[in-house]
């Protein structure tokens, strides 16, 4: 998810240039892009400082945390770092599939072509996953522990999208508190809190 990567760079005031690719912008199937990312997907990070080409949003976030997030996001203690990183993988493997069904069904599919049963199943799944997230946040302020971290970066765009497609969700006070904390972060407001498309 591009929002994960852009939010990280913006919050650290890194010098960046952004090239719009994918969807209506195209570019990601051009030969030059495919030479850098043979998957033809976004995001893609090109770090001129280290001469690294990297794709996959969680790999990019991990790299940015290690390379540029010392004393801000990167956690030296492997056990503490793993607390946040488990949520990165959980977001992609568990939350993303149900999120995708809802987003594609409600936002990117004309009403007359929607698979309402699939959308309802996605909503039910996400509501149960929100309960799991809420329970985790009952014990700590952030998914990454005591401080905002990689786990929060991974989950934030999914939760933002789901809360902003016009659905009613079961109240989850801990998740709502966490989300409110996110809305107070300038990078989150600038990069993630944009129209859901």
Image (spheres, rainbow, N blue to C red):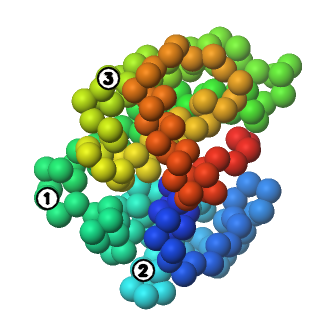
Q: Secondary structure at mark 1?
A: loop
Tag 2 residue? 52
Q: Secondary structure at mark 2?
A: strand
Can residue 69 be seen here? The reply is: yes
Q: Disc 1 and disc 3: Cα gap in Å?
A: 24 Å
Whether pointer 1 and pointer 2 mark residues with C-beta atoms closer than 8 Å, the reply is no
Judge the density around disc 3: few (<14), some (14-19), many (≥20) Cα neighbours within 10 Å. Answer: some
Residue 101 coordinates in the image, percent (x, y): 61, 28
Residue located 18% across and 50% down the image:
80
Label located before the other in sequence (2 or 3): 2
Residue 106 coordinates in the image, percent (x, y): 73, 27
Q: Is residue 49 above or below residue 34?
A: below
Residue 135 badge: 3
- Nearer to us: label 2 or label 3: 3
Q: Quadrant of residue 26?
A: bottom right
Residue 77 badge: 1
Residue located 54% across and 67% down the image:
10
Q: Secondary structure at mark 3?
A: helix
Can residue 1 be seen here? The reply is: no
Residue 86 coordinates in the image, percent (x, y): 28, 43
Q: Disc 1 and disc 2: Cα gap in Å?
A: 25 Å
Q: Is residue 165 above or below residue 153?
A: above
Residue located 45% across and 32% down the image:
177
Image quarter hosting the C terminus: top right
Q: Nearer the viewer, residue 175 or 121?
A: 175
Q: Quadrant of residue 167?
A: top right
Q: Is residue 183 above or below residue 176?
A: below
Label located before the other in sequence (1 or 3): 1
């Amino acid at each position: 998810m591009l929002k994960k990567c852009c939010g990280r760079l913006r919050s650290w005031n890194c010098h960046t240039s952004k090239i719009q690719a994918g969807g209506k912008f195209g570019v990601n199937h051009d030969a030059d892009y495919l030479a850098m990312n043979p998957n033809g997907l976004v995001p893609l990070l090109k770090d001129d400082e280290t001469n690294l080409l990297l794709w996959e949003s969680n790999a990019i976030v991990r790299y940015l945390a290690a390379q540029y997030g010392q004393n801000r996001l990167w956690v030296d203690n492997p056990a503490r770092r793993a607390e946040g990183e488990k949520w990165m993988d959980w977001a992609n493997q568990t939350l993303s599939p149900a999120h995708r069904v809802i987003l594609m069904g409600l936002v990117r599919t004309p009403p007359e072509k929607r698979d309402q049963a699939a959308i309802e199943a996605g909503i039910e799944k996400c509501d149960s996953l929100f309960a799991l997230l809420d329970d985790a946040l009952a014990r700590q302020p952030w998914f990454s522990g005591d401080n905002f971290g990689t786990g929060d970066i991974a989950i934030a765009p999914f939760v933002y999208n789901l809360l902003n497609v016009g659905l009613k969700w079961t109240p989850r006070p801990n998740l709502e508190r966490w989300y409110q904390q996110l809305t107070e972060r300038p990078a989150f407001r600038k990069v993630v809190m944009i129209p859901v498309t």
